[in-house]
Amino acid sequence: MLSSLHLSSAIVTDAPLTLLGSEHPLARCLDGSPGAFYHSRASADENVTKWVIFLQGGGECVDEASCSGRARTPLGSSQYMQRSISLHGFQSTNPANNPDFATWNMLYIPYCSGDLHLGMQRKPSASASIQFSGHHILAAVLDTAATSLGLSKARNVLFTGESAGGIGCVAHIDFLAQFVSNVTNGMGKTVAAPVGGYYYSNEWPYNATRPPPVEYIPWTYSALATYYKYWNAWTPVACRAVHEADPHKCMFAQTSYPFIKTPTFVIEAQTDKVVMPLHNGLPAVWDSSPSLCNNEVKGCPASVLNYMASWRNHMASAIHQVGSLENKTGDGLFHPACLIHVEFTIEAPRIHNRNYLQAVGDWMFARSGVRSSYRYIDTCEGVMCGYCTAALVEA
């Protein structure tokens, strides 16, 4: 039975929180509290069969100490989640900012499992009483939406997520598309647009001395094998069938992308201001001064710039396959030369005078006369050389 937590009977523009019921015993946050979702109904009659489904981001935890601490926060327990939230990005309900999707049904899945939305554990660990159930939460929310919210009548679904939610989105694209097809008797069609979720195995951590590296969580295939086992992680079926000996590699889009059957539009920065410090040890010098290295080359230490350039090259090699493989030419890519993580806005970045929402809308609705290819890629020399901020766009 659902537990709906509405603020009041008054008109509320925010989306209210609903806890998953006892019929979904596996769908648990790290602390064992029930998984949850936020939902708002379509505000236009013509869009009642259209959905945007979003996975929240928020890093990951890879050991009992960090996971136990996380379990006492909204990223590990539904006990601490806000009872309603304002939606953003593809789920913004402001038609001026989000004309293509603002009036669709919105399903927002908060992140409380610490496992990139991939965990499939069936019971808590004996030592720390934590449970990794991200995959189970997603499956339970979809089941609830189909039986109680109208997802079974869907005709168009946009599946997205940011950061850790972007990773979860990539891993579950075909899973969700198949679910939608099944519950709609083949009438519902899904496309995906992960934001900041296209990851690759980075074997080259920052190792300069001025400034020195910071502590980081390794983000390589060998490290991923450990996390895969720790979380009992879900990986995409088609990719896993080919990589039977090393299924953990399918957690990264670098490996899983060629096997995705569902139309996909990837939104990813060429240099990532969160991933490079968190997973590669690059000091976040831009946090110490608003003007230092923050999409501005001037004043940026040479060692930091050199590492950014190297990281950009590795990303370019990993992401080149998006929209260019023989069976994937219909896919799209928005890939600005900016130092951001998931801070894509209507103002910036822009490529060919399009922001990411416009680019995805043009691709999804096949707007005639817009572009023959939907691969938006900054090709300027160096790093942080794109239209990365509102000030640059207006200049």
Image (tube, helix red, strand yellow):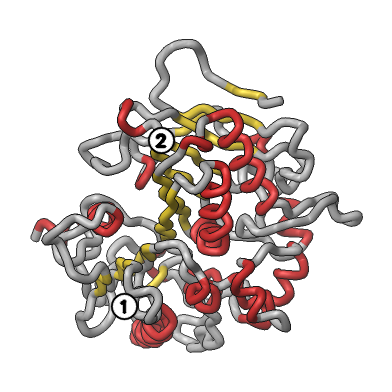
Compare marks 2 and 1 and give the one earlier in the sequence.
Answer: 2
Q: Secondary structure at mark 1?
A: loop
x, y percent for residue 186: 49, 48
Q: Residues within 10 Å of mark 1 (few under 14, many from 20)?
A: some
Q: Quadrant of residue 236?
A: bottom right
For the question of whether residue 292 can be seen, the reply is no
For the C terminus, which image quadrant? bottom left
Q: Quadrant of residue 50?
A: top left
In this view, which residue lies farthest toward the left?
395
How many marks can you see? 2
For the question of whether residue 63 can be seen, the reply is yes
- Marks 2/1: CA distance? 49 Å
Closer-to-camera residue (54/324): 324
Q: Which mark is residue 300?
A: 1
Q: Is residue 332 above or below residue 394?
A: below
Report which residue position mark 2 lands on: 49
Q: Amino acid at mark 2?
A: Thr
Q: Is residue 34 above or below residue 323?
A: above
Closer-to-camera residue (52/198): 52
Q: Secondary structure at mark 2?
A: loop
Closer-to-camera residue (171/66): 171
Side (left or right) of 95 relative to 175: left
Q: Residue at image x 60%, y 80%?
A: 220
In this view, which residue lies farthest toward the right?
126
Q: Residue at image x 66%, y 55%?
A: 114
For the N terminus, which image quadrant? top right
Q: Amino acid at mark 1?
A: Cys
Side (left or right) of 272 relative to 391: right
